[in-house]
Image (cartoon, rainbow, N blue to C red):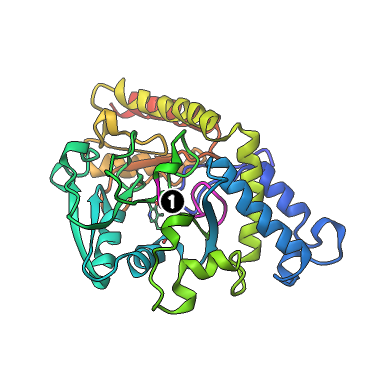
Amino acid sequence: MADRIYNFNPGPAALPLEVLEEARDNFVQHQGQGISIMEMSHRGKVVEAINDETQNLLLELLGLSQGYHALFMGGGASTQFALVPLNFLPQGKTAGYVLSGNFSEKAFEEAKHLGDASVAATSKGEKWARIPAQEDIALPTGAAYLHITVNNTIEGSQWSDLPDTRGVPLIGDVTSDILSRERDMSKFALVYAGAQKNLGPAGVTAVVVKDEFLQTGAGHIPTVLRYATFAKNKSLYNTPPVHSIYMMNLVLKWTQRQGGMSNLERLNREKAGVIYDAIDTSGGFYQGLVEKPYRSIMNVTWRMQSVELEKRFVQESVQNGFEGLGGHRSVGGLRASAYNAVPHKACTALADFMKDFQRRNG
Ligand SMILES: *Cc1c(COP(=O)(O)O)cnc(C)c1O
């Protein structure tokens, strides 16, 4: 397995090699039990234990072992865009949305289908090159909650300090942010993350919700769309995506071995730093899309002088063993997604390739 490519895919994204190997060894027979995990009952002891352990591990890694529930749901982060207002935006209240990129706009659009939602702040006028400042956030009166996208996967920006909401429940889309850096997660009433960036393969969505906030959820909506149903049943109300949860279990144990969010922040800063350096020392050959204080340590975005040159860059990168460097279709340019599982050596290899490409084309 020496020749794994340098995987900078934005999601589904790189998984730790150790995790893939352990999953492979248990694929046909789970720990020699004559049956695979995908064939077992989700109500049996083995799956129940994995489910419990994974929920506890996630809470522990986030520093939320007390007063929070971890839920495993379906439908990806996009379904959360709708479930959040469905559960927590009652008539007579307004939800505030900070718009900092494409995914936050999508979340806002879904909320408008379901209730009264307003833009609390936006950086669209600055082409998403920054995160709105605290003083620019206008909380609606009688706010149901404030929603933020903590890392903007497409644009390449990331919140550093979380906003002060003066008691209004804070909800975060942490799909591409979760466990990437040290955060006081207790500032959130609810966070959600599609697994396919920092938690495992696609197929399960992690939600972590504060118990107090959970109790304020709507009771008149369909059972299977209520967060409370998942909390009450340890996410075993219906058949969960057992294999995806098992994979998350392995990824979380790997995350723990890496030293959790504080040590991963250090590693991720170094990794992204190597790529940002290649941009910043290029004399304008590569141009970052985000202002420095708001740069993401997960998704590094940049562009070049012409679309032609960008195309050649992507083509040659593929020939050199890199994958996933084309920017999102909505913004163009280039993007390197260096999630937790992307090794440091992939980032130094990319920086070397960028310098070499510049020498040949600059
Ligand atoms: C990837 C991503 C999404 C979309 O996730 P799905 O699971 O495909 O619905 C939403 N928000 C953010 C921040 C993302 O990075």
Q: How many marks?
A: 1
Q: Is residue 226 above or below residue 321?
A: below
Left or right: 331 in relation to 263: left
Which residue is pictured at 50% across the width and 41% down the height?
179
Residue 31 locus on image (x, y percent):
83, 56
* Residue 15 visible to an observer of this rendering: yes
Q: Is residue 86 above or below residue 350?
A: below
Please tell me in which quadrant of the rendered image residue 317 appears. top left
Please tell me in which quadrant of the rendered image residue 16 appears. top right
Left or right: 289 in relation to 59: left
Which residue is pictured at 43% across the width and 79% down the height?
222
Magenta: predominant secondary structure element? loop
Q: Which residues are magenta?
A: 188-201
Please tell me in which quadrant of the rendered image residue 44 appears. bottom right
Q: Identify which residue, 50 or 76, lies in the foreground.
A: 50
Q: Identify which residue, 41 or 357, lies in the foreground.
A: 41
Residue assigned mark 1: 175
* Residue 203 visible to an observer of this rendering: no
Residue 207 locus on image (x, y percent):
48, 57
Residue 115 locus on image (x, y percent):
24, 70
Q: Work out which residue is located at the far left of the displayed protein and give it.
A: 125
Which residue is pictured at 62% across the width and 47% down the height?
57
Residue 318 locus on image (x, y percent):
46, 43
Q: Quadrant of the N terminus?
A: top right
Is the CB of mark 1 within 8 Å of ligand 1? yes
* Residue 197 lies within the magenta run: yes
Q: Quadrant of the C terminus?
A: top left
Q: Quadrant of ligand 1?
A: bottom left
